[in-house]
Amino acid sequence: MQRRTFLLALAAPVLMVTIGASTASAQADKPIRIGMTVSSAGTFALAAQSGHRGAQIWVDDVNSRGGIAVGGKKRKVELVILDDRSDKQLVPRVYETLIKDEKVDLVFGPFGSTLTAAAANTTETNGTFMVIWSASADSIYKQGYKYIVSATQIAGTLLGQPAVRALHSMGVKKVAFAYVDEPFPAALTQGAIDLAKQLGMQVTMDEKFAKGTKDFNILIQKAKASGAEAFYPTAYEGDQMTIARQIRETNADFKAVYLVYASQPQFLQQSGKDGHYVFSQTLLHEKINWKVTHGLNRAQMVASYNRLFPNAQYPGDFQTILAYGAGVITEEMIKTADSLDAAKLKAAALKLSGKIVTATGEYQIDETGKQYKNEFSIMQTLPNGLEVVYPPAVATAKPVYPVPVFAKR
């Protein structure tokens, strides 16, 4: 079997998304081809597929406007999608296929820091510009890469800090931290711990656990025994559903529990009462609305989601809007650069820093491509629904703290 055939077989199904670009092949101008991998299975599948839908919303919108002007002519956009199966060993080969065989002009990163870090060496070696929409690990931006930009995802060490500020504002003095041994959760937790200490909070536990852990009871009991008022475990969505269930099953009564993914539609749907009173964060909620300067606003994006994906298992979530916003910023980079050259796109990305507000929020990067804006709002899942509880400027309700003990719920 030839190498290309082998890779495409590994990455099956291969999907060429050409929303709104059905006539592009008949046009004299070639479409702008953007490569992207999406996980069909594994740890990152839910989030990756949600992000993919966000990218498709942007493609649909930009093509409905005739495409993006490059060199004085509008060109439509095509997404070229391969499957990475949540496998960081597969990612470099699949991105090489996108670049060398599919001849894409630039790429969107895969979901998450683990896979994006695996893709970055390949894209950089090949001089291909990569727009990151979800990877937040600070370590990615310390490698000296010239052609990467985080369009919407705030850096990992900053990502977990709004929750700490929220907990501090409620009066929490002691916090137990735990995280799965992966780049994104590690970065988020380290930034959160640093801020907690700066604010004078006591960190009663700083514990990492192995990927694949399914029984969190010992970790939960250790956090409880540490005297923590708040428990702040960071993992991916499926693991956090398990943690929420096991906290309830063991009647581990913390005054506050923070789970980064607990406001995701699928978490709310599957966890039910396990998720009541849990604090979380999001960028996409009907009560969070930015005054956008570029692209669709939140309500328009949600309307597009419902039109394009009427049979989706879940509504759009913050992964959806992160990827959509990344597309909007990519469009502005291309227009500003008037080119698809990687160096010119990076220069345009820097020029646009601080000048764009998308449905996700503000865009601001440094020379490494690291994102400093797009802070998440802190939510609490109350029995009657989600409320924004921090920051005060957008809060829709006061936080319930301490939360009711399980015996009185």
Image: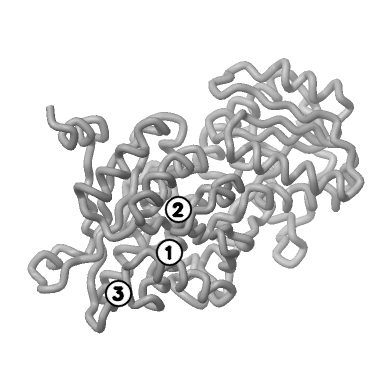
* Label placed on residue 348: none
Q: Which residue is mark 2?
A: 320
What residue is pinned by disc 1? 301
Question: What amino acid is at disc 1?
Answer: Met
Q: Residue 189 placed where, x, y %?
A: 70, 39
Q: Mark 2 and mark 3 in contact (Cβ < 8 Å)?
A: no
In contact (CB < 8 Å): disc 2 and disc 1: yes
Label placed on residue 68: 3
Q: Quadrant of the N terminus?
A: top left
In this view, 158 is above or below 45: below
- Residue at horizontal 46%, vertical 44%? 116
The residue type indicated by label 2 comes to Thr
Q: How many marks?
A: 3
Q: CA distance from mark 3 to mark 1?
A: 19 Å
The structure residue drawn at horizontal position 79% and vertical position 25%, both measured from the top left corner, is 223
- Asked if residue 381 can be seen in this view, the reply is no
Tell me the distance, in whole angstroms, between the alpha carbons under discs 2 and 1: 9 Å
Q: Quadrant of residue 58?
A: bottom left
Q: Earlier in the sequence, mark 2 or mark 1?
A: 1
Who is closer to the viewer here, 161 or 398? 161
Q: Residues within 10 Å of mark 3 (few under 14, many from 20)?
A: many
- Give the side of residue 23 with respect to residue 194, left or right: left
